[in-house]
Image: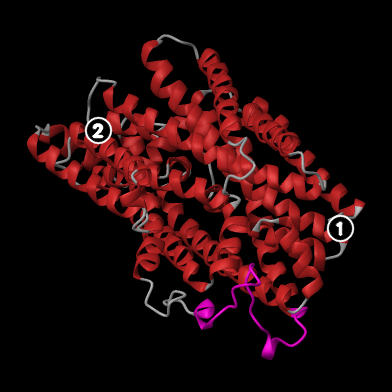
Amino acid sequence: MELNVLTIVAFVLYALLILGIGIYSFKKSKSMSDYFIGGRQLGPWTTAISAQASDMSGWLLMGLPGAVLVSGLTESWIAIGLFIGTYLNWRILAARLRKMSYAAGDAITIPEYLQKRFFTESPVVRLVCAAIIFVFFLIYTASAFSAGAKLFAFIFNTDNYTLCLTIGALIIISYTFLGGFFAVCWTDLIQGILMFAALVIVPIVAVCNIPDMGSAALGTMDAAKPITDYYLSFINNSNGEIAWTTILSGLAWGLGYFGMPHILVRFMAIKSSDMIKKSRLIATVWVFVTLVAAVLVGVFGNMFLTSNPELMEKFLALGDAEKIFMFLSSSLLPALIAGVVLSAILAAIMSTADSQLLVTASAVTNDMFALFKKNASQKTLMWVSRGAVIAISVIAYFIALDPNSSVMGLVSYAWAGLGAAFGPAMLLSLFWKRMTIWGAVAGAAVGGASVIIWESVPVLSGTGIYSLLPAFFLALVAVVVVSLMTKVDSAKVEELFKKANSTTVDAIAEESKS
């Protein structure tokens, strides 16, 4: 379908604004700490919105509404799981990680934190963690590139997927390469606000354009399969049975938060742990509203299309349920506003892809290259980091070349791998003094491998159970068992926990940055 010129102009201007922020931020990144965690100088609003915007990605405006549009409200259990996980992550882990990461030698990446937390010079844990980050973030970044390609194809009304993929990837790579963490977090703040506004506007406009809301019908994407009452049920599947597998798998998404490096690094970057409470409130409200709105886009989109057969036909011609948010925006909003709202999808894609690129680059540079080139200057490390952004992007680009790839499917795989590999290790490292370095290595390896095996073996993936659920608990068991089988330096651990619990640790950190 063709879009108004004003829509395209608004969209292009937004993309140029984001690139401008990247160029402006170029000179502010003078060290590895600046480039990867902003020198631990983020405020509560930037931390909160940046963490959640980098979390949600294009699946919030594409994958989730598309899944609800096709399958009904049982898909909303993913949203429920993510909301619970968001709150618990901020409540349990955020402040503790801010203090512990500084107390453990001012670590600036998750692999570095784990090495310093266990007082070892051995590079094993950093190399294992960096390898896991590299593998799963490649898939995660590819999902963002794929979403960007679909968006550009829709905006410019073209079937040239490869060209659209290239344009979207170049925009993301450019400002991440230039600005690093400062650019990422400030653009995430802007993009998070834009995503919030767009997600609130579209379902409201959709429901206002349904001719008779009181008797609105529901339809399916396949006219040969009439919809049943299950669509509006949170617990029943199409057979009228309780969808236990869907419910448990949806809730399991919340476990992933404890192991997401691109979110955890925001906790490490905030100015003081005293700001966490305010950030938690902001983040929780943002997540609740956007998740509910995304679900409503799917439900109201279904009702709107069913009541408009002509538009239903046009939408079905697109051949992709994940484009429902785009379709509603372009069909119902004035051209200029539609351009701004469609920019929210680009915002969601960029806010996640940039963070993923940055974390993966930090793993390559700080946790691989720097281990073997210990005397490298900050300038050298900065350019190695920027080179890593380019190299990682190229690989992710080739992964995303398949035009039929599902944004939801790619995100699901990467989320499970990262959550299972790092979640149990991060949680226990912050609260369990008996944990050892080998327990951390075992947990990361078992968690990541379990997801790959579960997703690869048909008899396991065919159960419908999300791989994150079994993999997380297998990793948890591995951490505990191996830790109990290996030795721990109790005196050093007690000293570290004492330092992390000190009320002056944030003040010391601030003084060191001034």
- Secondary element at tag 2: helix
Residue that label 1 marks: 336
Front in this rendered view, residue 238 or 274: 238
Q: Residue at x 87, y 60 (%)?
A: 335
Q: CA–CA distance between discs 1 and 2?
A: 52 Å
**Which label is found at residue 451?**
none
Amino acid type of the residue that numbered disc 1 sits on in the rendered structure: Leu
Can residue 106 be seen here? The reply is: no
Q: Give the x, y percent position of residue 83.
A: 45, 63
Q: Is residue 214 magenta?
A: yes
Residue that label 2 marks: 441
Q: Residue at x 60, y 65 (%)?
A: 294
- Looking at the rendering, the stretch of residues picked out in magenta corresponds to 208-232
Q: Residues within 10 Å of mark 2 (few under 14, many from 20)?
A: many
User: Relative to 463, is 145 on the left or the right?
Assistant: right
Question: From this viewpoint, which residue is outermost toward the bottom?
Answer: 214
User: Relative to 96, is 137 on the left or the right?
Assistant: right
Residue 229 vertical placement versus 187 (above, below): below
Q: Is residue 376 magenta?
A: no
Residue 237 vertical placement versus 317 (above, below): below
Q: Main secondary structure of the magenta part?
A: loop
